[in-house]
Amino acid sequence: MAVKPCPMRVLLTTTSYQDAPGPHHDLLAEQNYQIQRERGPLAEERMLELAGEFDAFLCGDDEITKAVIAKSLPRLRVISKYGVGLDKIDVAECTKRRLPVLYTPGTNHVSVAEHTFCLLLALARHLVESANSVRDGKWLRLTGHELAGKSLGIFGLGRIGQEVAKRAVAFGLKVHAVNRHWPDAFAKDYGVTHHDKIESMITQVDILSLHAGLSDKTRHLLNARTLALAKPRLLLINTARAELVNAPDLIAALDAEQLAGYAADVMEQEPPHPENPLLKHPRVIITPHIGSKTFESIPRQAMRATLNLINYLNGDTDFIQANPF
């Protein structure tokens, strides 16, 4: 009698994928994989406990380090990332070990760009403080700022950065940007001023919005030195990665009123420690990493991540790989 092959074992950790309705659930169920569900993002310690028992990871921002990769092989065949940020995965080690890392570019740029403007408007018009005062039975009428006529700097003019630029132009903002590969046609169409480095751009803008990936070159890009170059009362928006900003230097700039405000959708530790000084700073707004968490974006990301996984395991070439060999 022929022995039935064991089903593929898949570790599913992304909570957005698990919690949101959509056709991705049916598609995944149809594959007859053995699915183990965890509530990520998982720290390296938990990933090491699980590593070695799975043929595939369908993950979010879990810590997939060199040690996790080493323990996962040779069984692990593929990592399918829900989302676009890859800094929690040691992609260089995966490439060295010829372990494919798949991801979902082009699925969340509209949602993140809209959330960026949500944060910007909330900062500029003191929205949170004003609304909370009414909830508390007060009537605090704070004076805010118009966006029209101001200058916005975008660090990272990729898919999300370009969507932010489109909205900025509609608001009457003058747009400046830094990007490693300059999109000439887009910049001409939307009148975006090119800068080679953040040092030149930050001196000319009233608002700075971060949309770059995290790397050794971009980690703590904003620090005491670069923040000191900023125009007084800069508004800083971060819907990319918290580690782009040096947190102690950020707090010092806020306390000195070099920065008028900071709004972020990302923290170095998520959820953050309750004593993190950013959480209760009067000029800071923090949202719980919900920039791409919309009923429109989640199914797009989840379906792409699921198709990437299935197609790779089935030998189909319709998948998006971050580290093609």
Image (cartoon, rainbow, N blue to C red):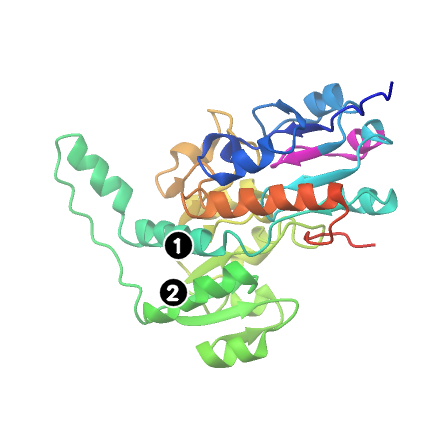
Of the pair 291 and 202, the residue shown nearer to us = 291
Residue type at the position of mark 1: Glu
Tell me the residue at 59%/56% (across/down): 212
Task: Identify the residue shown where x is 50% and y is 65%.
Answer: 162
Query: Which percent across, then down, holds residue 268?
Result: 57, 36
| Residue range highlighted in magenta | 57-70
Task: Determine whether the residue tagged by mark 2 lies in a helix, strand or loop.
Answer: helix
Residue 247, picture quadrant: top right
Which numbered disc flags the more N-terminal residue, 2 or 1?
1
Query: Which residue is identified by label 1?
Result: 114
* Residue 151 visible in the snapshot: no
Q: Considering depth in this image, is 139 or 259 the residue closer to the camera?
A: 139
Element under disc 1: helix
Question: Residue 206 appears at what percent x and percent y?
Answer: 40, 64
Q: Is residue 26 above or below residue 5?
A: below
Q: Pick out the residue farthest to the front.
A: 1
Residue 235 picture location, percent across and down = 41, 55
Can residue 133 be seen here? The reply is yes
Horizontal side, residue 11 vs residue 276: left or right: right
Residue at the disc numbered 2? 167
Q: Please name the residue shown 68% across and 41% down the image.
A: 310
Q: Quarter of the image holding residue 169?
A: bottom left
Q: The residue under label 2 is which amino acid type?
A: Arg
